[in-house]
Amino acid sequence: MSIIQKQQELISEFAMFPTWMEKYEYIIDLGKELPVLDESLKNEDHLIKGCQSRVWISARRSENGALHFTADSDAIITKGMVSLILRVFEGEKGQDIVDAPMDFLKEIGLLENLSPTRSNGLAAMIKQIKTYGLLMQ
Amino acid sequence: MSISQQILNIRKEFPILHQKVRGVELVYLDNAATTQKPEAVIACIQEYYHQYNSNVHRGAHYLANLATARMEEAREMVKEFLGASSVEEIIYTQGTTDGINLVAYAWGNENIKEGDEILIATSEHHANIVPWQELCKRTKGVLKVIPLNPDGSWVSNYADWVSPKTKLVAVGWVSNATGVVHPVADMIQRAHAVGAKVLIDGAQAVSHFALDVQQLNCDWLVFSGHKLFGPTGVGVLYGKKSVLESMQVYRTGGEMIDRVSFSGTTFNQLPYKFEAGTPHIEGIIALSEAIRWYKNLGWNFIHEVEVMQKSAMQDVMESIPALQWIGQAENRVALYSFVHPEIHPGDIGALLDQQGIAVRTGHHCTQPLWESMKLSGSARASFAVYNSEEEIAYFKKALIKTLDMLL
C-alpha cells in the first residue's frame, strides 16, 4: 500500500466515527496498542521539542532502504497521534517520506480539533519524521 | 431566592457563557487563568469608544475632561475596594506581573544590597519568583524560599525564614496551582518586626474574599483586572504612600513628569510618577465597573457560593478512586488541582475539552511547586461566582468518563 493509500484508509476509518469523543476513543486505542519504546531509547536524542507532553521517536533503516519507527509518549492521546502518523510512514523509503503530502490530517479534521499547543506538537513530530527520512535515504 | 436561582441570574449577565463548544454547553472552569466579563463591563468599554474616547490629563476639551474624570473616579473605586487611605496609593499597571517588576526595579534596585535577603515561598507563581531572582543578580541579594507541607500550605515554622537580613517578603496570598490560602497577615507582622517590607501577590485573592490593605498593613499589594471580571491589560499596584514616595521612577516618559528640560527633569506627584505614557484608559474605567459589579453581589453571597462549590468539589475529589487531589489544605478557595498516577494531565484536559469543559493543564507557571511535589503538573478546575452546582455535577460525570476512556 502506498503512503497515499494508507492516508486514504485512515481518512475513511475516522469518517466511521460520528462524534469527536469516538474519534478520540480510537486515537486512545491506537496509543494503547503502540508497542512500548525501550527505556534506553527514551533519551534527549529521540525527544521531540515543542510538545506539552514528552514524545520520543526513533528510526532504523533496514538494508532494503525501508524505515522502521518506534515511538512513545507519557500522554496516551499524544501516543495515539504518533501511532496514527507512523502507520502512514512505517516501512517507507526516506525520499517517499520526505515527499509525502500531509493533507490527510486536515481531512481527518484533526488539526482544527486540536489546541494550538497540541497542533504545534504534531507539527514538531512530523518534522522529526521527515528529518529521519532525509537523513536515512 | 435560592443560591442556585441567584447563580442562574448572574449567569445571564455573561454572554460568553451561553454558547455551545464542540456541540455541548460550555462549562468554564478556568477562572484562575482569567474570569469572564459581565455585560456591564463589556458595555462600559463600548460606551467609552462610542461616547468619550479621549486622552486623559492634558486636553482642554470636553471629551478629555470627561475621560479624565471617569478615570479618576475609577481610581477612587479601587481605593475603596482595597481599603487604601488615598488615591495616591493606587498605581495602574498592566497587571500583577507588571506591578511586581515595578517594585523590583523602583524599590529593589536601591534598597537590596549584597547579602540582603528576599523571602518568597515555594508556592509562588513564576511572576513572583523571576523578578526577584533577577533583582538578586543585579544587587547580589539572596533569595530565600519557605518550603511547603505535603498539603500545599507553608510549613508551620515559616516565620523561621524571616531573619535580621530579610529586607523584603514577597508572597502570594492564594496559590494559583492549589488554591491554598497562606497566612499572609501573620507574615506581614513577622516581617515588619525585623524591618522588612512586604509585597502581597493578590492575583488569586481579590476575586475570592474582601480585603483591606490598611488592616493587613502590607507595603504593596498587586493584582490583575482580568481575574476580577475586568478587562485584560490592566492591573493595580497598591503601595503605602510613604513607601511609594521613597521609590525611584521606573518607566519614564510622558505623564510621569513635572518639568522636562535638557538640564534635568523633575517628576510628577503620586500616583502619576509611576504611570508613564497614555494609560489603558478604557481598561481602567471598565475595571472599576467590574469592581462595582462584583461588590454589588455582596461578600456574603460570594462566600455562600464558594462554600457550595467547595463542598461539591470536595465530594468530586474524594469520590473518584485513584484521583489524587493536590494541595488539600483546609484554608482554601474553590480551586482544585488533581492528577492521576497513570494518566497525563494533558489527556484529561483534552477529553474534558471535548465535553465542553474548560480546565487548565500543565505546570500553571509554578514549576518549583511541582518540583517540590515530585510532579510535573496537574489538571486544574477553578471556580468563579457564576459556576453552578449543576456544572460541578456535569464536571464529575465528564471526569469519570474521561478517566474510564484513558485507563
Image (spheres, rainbow, N blue to C red):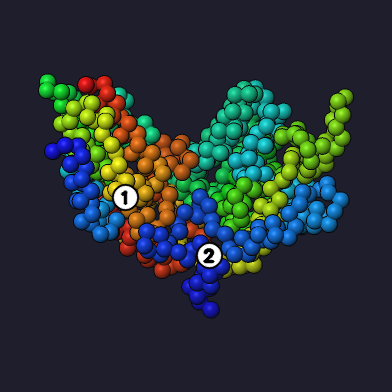
Q: Residue at x 28, y 59 (%)?
A: A19
Q: Secondary structure at mark 2?
A: helix
- Neighbor class of circle 1 (other Cα within 10 Å; few <14, some 14-19, many 20+) is some
**Can I make out residue B269 in this image?**
yes
Q: Is residue A127 left or right of residue B313?
A: left
B78 versus B361 height, above or below: below
B226 versus A123 height, above or below: below
Q: Is residue B9 left or right of residue A59?
A: right
Q: Position of residue A29 (x, y in %)?
A: 20, 48
Q: Position of residue B167 (x, y in %)?
A: 66, 32
Q: Is residue A93 left or right of residue B15?
A: left
Q: Chain of mark 1?
A: A
**Which residue carries the number 1 mark?**
A109
Q: Residue at x 42, y 39 (%)?
A: B370
Q: Nearer the viewer, residue A127 or B125?
A: A127
Q: Secondary structure at mark 1?
A: loop
| Same-subunit check for callouts 2 and 1 | no
**Which residue carries the number 2 mark?**
B15
Q: Position of residue B237 (x, y in %)?
A: 68, 45
B179 versus B290 height, above or below: above
Q: Chain of mark 2?
A: B
**Mark 1 and mark 2 in contact (Cβ < 8 Å)?**
no
Nearer to us: label 2 or label 1: 1
Q: Nearer the viewer, residue B405 or B130?
A: B405
**Can I make out residue B313 in this image?**
no
Q: Position of residue B86 (x, y in %)?
A: 78, 51
The amino acid type, in three-letter code, at marker 1 is: Gly
Q: Nearer the viewer, residue B8 or B342?
A: B8
The amino acid type, in three-letter code, at marker 2 is: Pro
